[in-house]
Amino acid sequence: MKIATWNVNSLKVRLPQVLDWLNANPDVTALCLQETKMDDPVFPKEEIESAGFFVEFAGQKTYNGVAIIAREAISDVIINLPEYPDAQKRVITATVAGIRLIGAYIPNGQALDSEKFPYKMAWLAAMKAFLIEQMALHPKLALLGDYNIAPEDRDVHDITKWQGGNLVSPQERDMFAQWLQLGLVDSFRLFDQPEKSFSWWDYRGFSFKKNAGLRIDHILLSPALAAQCTACEIDIEPRKNERPSDHTPVIATLS
DNA sequence: ATGGCGGCAATTTGCCGA
């Protein structure tokens, strides 16, 4: 089976692409979505269910919004971080096929001197506490989503353009490292990967054509799941679509 | 140094993403 994550940058625009992608990837048991940008009352629940899937979601209009689409039943859903009240809908946690999935849209931060940056750092700390709690309850756990963190310089097309700034700052990378210290593993780095592998490219300046991207979408696995992981790949095909999301799916294969 | 693209919401323009 496979589990996947995709920041779709508006599910209203991208729903046909999501359903096409799921049909083209029948081994994907669960797909976490970020930036659905839809209020719950207008979420296309019926369309997704009539296509043969289970779905859970937590949305808001214009910004944020997360969902899990699955081929098996979804249970024990938690919306957001229980100990961190937040009007922004950024996390959905649920169990699918015996695996605890945390789908997350981590705050962007905007810039180190922005008021949004301390929000990001506080949010990352709150997520760490939630991870500790959930890992203790669920040995088979995966944290999938748009992290808005490029963990290493090799995850950046040109580090000189980003050095020290938002998405690559020491503070953010330290928090990512703290999550790894909990025992979580970056599934992508369990395997040999092509150089300059990225999951996001700016819409502007022909960034995708130039492969001027960042790897900021990740699947972290608990030790028990990492032991089952046989592959992790970034699927760049949807980035070639008409009206693509600026992000593209990341997929982990589990034995 | 700035904006560049795209989605969205409120009205021709601004905010935000990363």
Image (spheres, coloured by chain):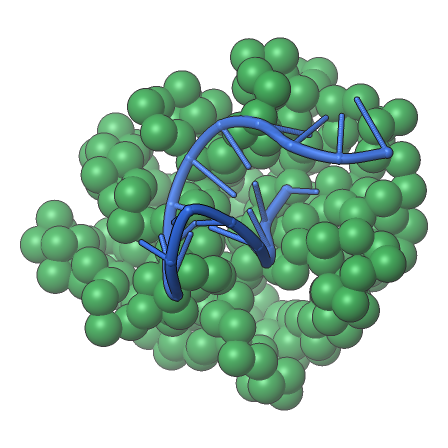
Chain colours: A green, B blue
A244 up-or-down from A81: above or below: above
A75 vs A9, left or right, is left
Residue A255 seen in the current view: no
Quadrant of the drawing holding the C terminus of chain A? top left
A159 vs A130, left or right, is right
Quadrant of the drawing holding the N terminus of chain A? top left
**Which residue: 41% across, 44% down?**
A8
A142 up-or-down from A75: above or below: above
Q: Which residue is most to the left? A: A50
A80 vs B8, left or right, is right
From the viewer's side, name the closer residue of A3 and A107: A107
Residue A2 seen in the current view: yes
**Which residue: 64% across, 60% down?**
A107
A36 vs A236, left or right, is left
Q: Position of residue A203 (x, y in %)?
A: 53, 29
**Which residue: 12% across, 48% down?**
A51
Q: Position of residue B4 (x, y in %)?
A: 57, 27
Q: Position of residue A91 (x, y in %)?
A: 51, 68
A218 up-or-down from A241: above or below: below
